[in-house]
Image (tube, grey):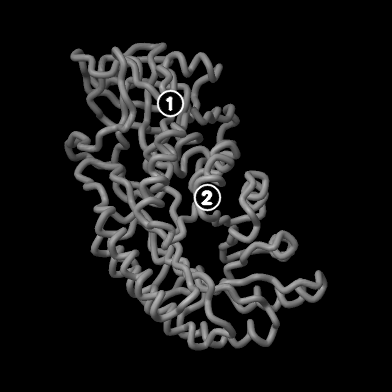
Amino acid sequence: MTTRSTTPRPAHTWCPPFPVTGNELQVGGVAISRLAQRVGQTPFYAYDRALILKRVQTLTEAFHGRIAVHYAVKANPMPALACMLAEAVDGFDVASAGELSIALDAGMPPARISFAGPGKGEAELSQAVAAGIVVNIESMREIVILERLSQTMGCAARVAVRVNPDFELKSAGMKMGGGPKPFGIDAEQVPEALRAIARSGLAFEGFHLFAGSQNLRAAALLEAQTKSYELARQLSQHAPSAPRSINLGGGFGLPYFPGDQALDIDTVTANLLSLADQAARDLPGTRLAIELGRYLVGEAGVYVCKIVDSKVSRGQRFLVVDGGLHHHLAASGNFGQVVRRNYPTAIGNKMGAADVEEVSVVGLLCTPLDLLADRVVLPRAAPGDYFVIFLSGAYGASASPQGFLGHPRPAEVLV
């Protein structure tokens, strides 16, 4: 359960990438109040397409085509956004049949789609084989099912082995590898799985390793990437054929909270290029890949609510907005935080105003958990003003309990 901090709130050092004209935040070149009129409702999520494409372009240019950049659709499965990214990245990684449909509809070639997840149903696996995508195998059970489906359909399922390594990503927001985990096959059991793949006649493609997510320490990422590559190289000796791809996962973090320092991406990029050089010597024909979601889209999104009330309770001012945790669970502190911390926020139509006050911003749900900003200093606001939560491009609408208490869903726009 998330614990509410009672310590003073330090100021955010993170700087929003959106310009301000006059006193209005601009997203995709559109003033926030004009954008709200264009959308036709609040609350809404807005994603700046230019910022997303710039982030992707910066990475792809740095890699010179030597490292494949995949998009993890779970970070933000908005169809329009997926269509845009299908033309910008090297592949999509999906985690359900629903996300697979989004990826295919977006125009990503099936050969460049992979499917991960520890509880894939037989119907989902059937769809994956029929589509011709790569299935990241996470248990011996999946091998048995895929062998049967391959025989029924007359085509060998394309598979990679998701490896649960014997190490974890240090300082990760969520650890997804190392120790007992539901994800992947334990490294020491992978040789047995590879032998079963060979006996089953499945089309072996490579390995997938994902040690953790939301990491801001370059040194920790370098260690995990280097260990992941070396583990995959060793396991390749047991494979039925040389791996075509080794997906080293992601984990690139964003500085959400006060005191966070941005990831040293240049150091991470240099290490990946060094590993690509090593792979060219060790495993000719094998391409390394990274799988990013949050890092590609997180900073390019905002969540926008309208203030509907301003009230004082025993000396503390509350701004009540027409959104809440049912739209943005992460900002409420109930999506992975142990001690609740505030996302960067603003009054979007009063940027830089000198008249400020300390407020708490709450949603319209009838629960004390619906706290979007706790005792933050913001420009003095009134009903009708726009409350903005930054860093909302990833794990926002789709990661929130939108059916809770029966309120309408937020709109989503790509600007």
Find residue 226 and report its horizontal and vertical position in percent. Answer: 33, 72
Which residue was labeled with disc 1?
A: 28
Q: In this view, does 36 lie above or below 90?
A: above
Label number found at residue 74? 2
Count neighbours of disc 1 (C-alpha within 10 A) and say few if under 14, some if 14 to 19, many if 20 or more.
some
Q: Is residue 82 left or right of residue 55?
A: right
- Amino acid type at circle 2 is Lys
Which numbered mark, 2 or 1, is in the foreground of this view? 1
Find residue 258 and report its horizontal and vertical position in percent. Answer: 22, 41
202 and 147: which one is in front?
202
- Amino acid type at circle 1 is Gly
Q: Which residue is drawn at 39% across and 48% down?
A: 295
Label 2 vs 1, first from the N-terminus: 1
Find residue 206 and report its horizontal and vertical position in percent. Answer: 53, 74
Q: What element carries label 1?
A: loop
Q: In this view, does 386 lie above or below 240?
A: above
